[in-house]
């Protein structure tokens, strides 16, 4: 376990990186996109865009990540998925990063990671899906089509992973859950 000072420094570095990405590149954590990107359609059989995230996929449930489907990634060399809380209160928080997903993959099962894909660290430093807890959060499930495999190791740090995703994004789509049931 790290010291409180090291944890604070690491947290500040992630926040600064997230804010930089929000204002440039493909806006991984931010809402806008200064580049013209192709659009990916993202959906889930468990909730609609703008609806609440079912409690089963929160820290009060035990189902892990919700199932997701997407289309519009043709021409990609790999796919990445980032789940974040875009609520302004407390700063950006990343709950899940999956990268180097085979570009032929068009869906993700409940509590699943596609074969060959890698997981990056979240804001909390954990590797894997970290279920959201704040009932008033705005949780974005964003799928990115990339022009290359990232080639980062399993458990790669959050800042370098987000920077690499931002620099390789050619298309993006998002499914947002407003609050948790």
Image (cartoon, rainbow, N blue to C red):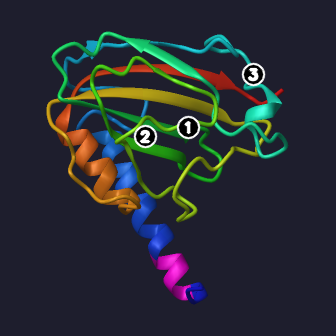
Residue 86 badge: 1
Looking at the image, tell me whether mark 1 or mark 3 is earlier in sequence order: 3
Q: Which quadrant, please, contains the N terminus?
A: bottom right
Q: Secondary structure at mark 1?
A: loop
Type of secondary structure dominating the magenta stretch: helix
Q: Is residue 145 above or below residue 99?
A: above
Q: Nearer the viewer, residue 177 or 128?
A: 128
Residue located 27% across and 16% down the image: 73
Q: Which residue is mark 3?
A: 52
The residue carrying pointer 3 sits among few (fewer than 14), some (14 to 19) or many (20 or more) residues within 10 Å by Cα, namely: some
Looking at the image, tell me whether mark 3 or mark 2 is earlier in sequence order: 2
Residue located 49% across and 15% down the image: 69
C-alpha gap between disc 1 and disc 2: 7 Å
Residue 146: image x %, image y %? 22, 31
Left or right of 17, for residue 171: left
Asked if disc 3 and disc 2 are in contact, CB closer than 8 Å, the reply is no
C-alpha gap between disc 3 and disc 2: 20 Å
Q: Nearer the viewer, residue 138 or 181?
A: 181
Which residues are the magenta region?
5-9
Q: Which residue is mark 2?
A: 29
Residue located 53% across and 58% down the image: 123
Determine which quarter of the picture holds residue 3.
bottom right
Q: Is residue 77 above or below residue 84?
A: above
Asked if disc 1 and disc 2 are in contact, CB closer than 8 Å, the reply is yes
Q: Secondary structure at mark 2?
A: loop
The residue carrying pointer 2 sits among few (fewer than 14), some (14 to 19) or many (20 or more) residues within 10 Å by Cα, namely: many
Left or right of 111, for residue 161: left
Residue 37 badge: none
């Amino acid at each position: 376990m790290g010291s409180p000072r090291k944890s604070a420094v690491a947290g500040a570095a992630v926040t600064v990186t997230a804010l930089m990405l929000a204002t440039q590149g493909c806006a991984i954590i931010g809402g806008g996109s200064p580049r013209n990107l192709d659009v990916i359609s993202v959906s889930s059989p468990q909730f609609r865009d703008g609806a609440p995230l079912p409690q089963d996929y929160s820290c009060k449930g035990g189902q892990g990540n919700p199932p997701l489907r997407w289309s519009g990634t043709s021409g990609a060399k790999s796919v990445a998925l980032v789940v974040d809380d875009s609520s302004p209160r407390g700063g950006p928080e990343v709950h899940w990063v999956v990268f180097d997903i085979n570009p032929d993959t068009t869906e993700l099962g409940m509590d699943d990671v596609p074969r060959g894909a890698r997981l990056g660290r979240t804001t909390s430093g954990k590797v894997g899906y970290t279920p959201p807890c704040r009932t008033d959060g705005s949780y974005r499930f964003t799928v990115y089509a990339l022009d290359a495999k990232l080639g980062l190791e399993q458990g790669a740090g959050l800042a370098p992973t987000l920077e690499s995703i931002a620099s390789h994004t050619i298309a993006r789509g998002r499914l947002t859950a407003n609050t948790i049931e």
